[in-house]
Image (cartoon, helix red, strand yellow):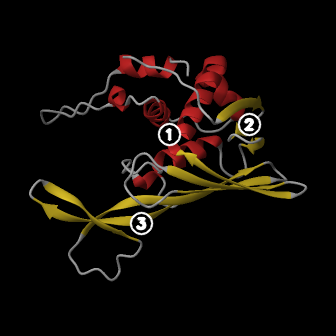
Amino acid sequence: MNLQKRECPINMRIIPYGGGWTNVYMNFGSEELYFIISYCMGDNFTDFMKLLYHLYPEHDDTEEVYDDMEYQYAVVKSTDDGYETDFITDDTSNLECPFVYHNVPWKTEFIWDEEGSCSVWHLEREPNENTDFVLHIDIKICRNEKKNYHYDVSYKELCYALAKAYTEVIKKHGFLGYHRAVYSEDIQMRYFLFFKAYALDCLDVIKLERFKEKGEGERSSLANELELLLFDM
């Protein structure tokens, strides 16, 4: 496995402050923003990870975020090779039955609560099936004064910054130490491994081996997953 780190225009630092608090610092290229996250009010940092993961159009386990993500619908047509997308729409009520569609992630929102102040995030992408895309980010920080920020960033670069920051914090605090400090849900390894593999252009590292016989489930390589997990970005 040939993993190679690179420069990233987005910088992110995660500080497990302790006592259920998380401090996050982000620089999208112009100025550094800081966020304080309470474990007992609003969304956690792990919710940001979950929503970012599900903005990737090939992640079809939508039940994890269905109430938090807005979708459009890719209506498919039959071809000699199976099915392909015919068109994408935001309304299927006028379509003639029968028809088949799958969900296409579009936009989502979450709130980091500081117990007295908050940061409201709105994430939106073009509703298509592209896997390399620009993410439109609107952030409203409500403290003594309200400030609004807008960024158009590469989804891949944001995944890189997130994966790098989490790699650094986990190597310093460990999974158990991190959980004890912030009190939030455990880090979802499936999301974490995807962010690293996608950002490093090595999705084949986490590719599943499909079962060949009934009764034998899918498999992945634990050796590859551990090497990817420990790789410094």
Q: Nearer the viewer, residue 76 or 220?
A: 76
Residue 223: tell me if it is visible.
yes
**Residues under labels 1 and 3: Cα distance?**
22 Å
Sequence-wise first label, 3 or 2: 2
Q: Nearer the viewer, residue 2 or 73?
A: 2
Q: Residue at x 45, y 21 (%)?
A: 228
Crowd band around label 2 with a 10 angstrom C-alpha radius: few (<14), some (14–19), many (20+)? some
Say which of marks 2 and 1 sits in front: 1
**Residues under labels 2 and 1: Cα distance?**
19 Å
Q: Which image quadrant for residue 19?
A: top right
Question: Where's residue 2, x and y in %?
Answer: 39, 17
User: Which residue is identified by label 2?
Assistant: 25
Q: Amino acid at mark 3?
A: Gln
Question: Where's residue 125, x and y in %?
Answer: 51, 57
Q: Residue at x 52, y 44 (%)?
A: 155
Q: Amino acid at mark 1?
A: Lys
Say which of marks 1 and 3 sits in front: 1
Residue 186: tell me if it is visible.
no
User: Which residue is identified by label 1?
Assistant: 156
Tag 1 secondary structure: helix
Q: Residue at x 13, y 32 (%)?
A: 212
Q: Quadrant of the N terminus?
A: top left
Q: Quadrant of the C terminus?
A: top right
User: Which residue is identified by label 3?
Assistant: 72
Q: Residue at x 39, y 76 (%)?
A: 91
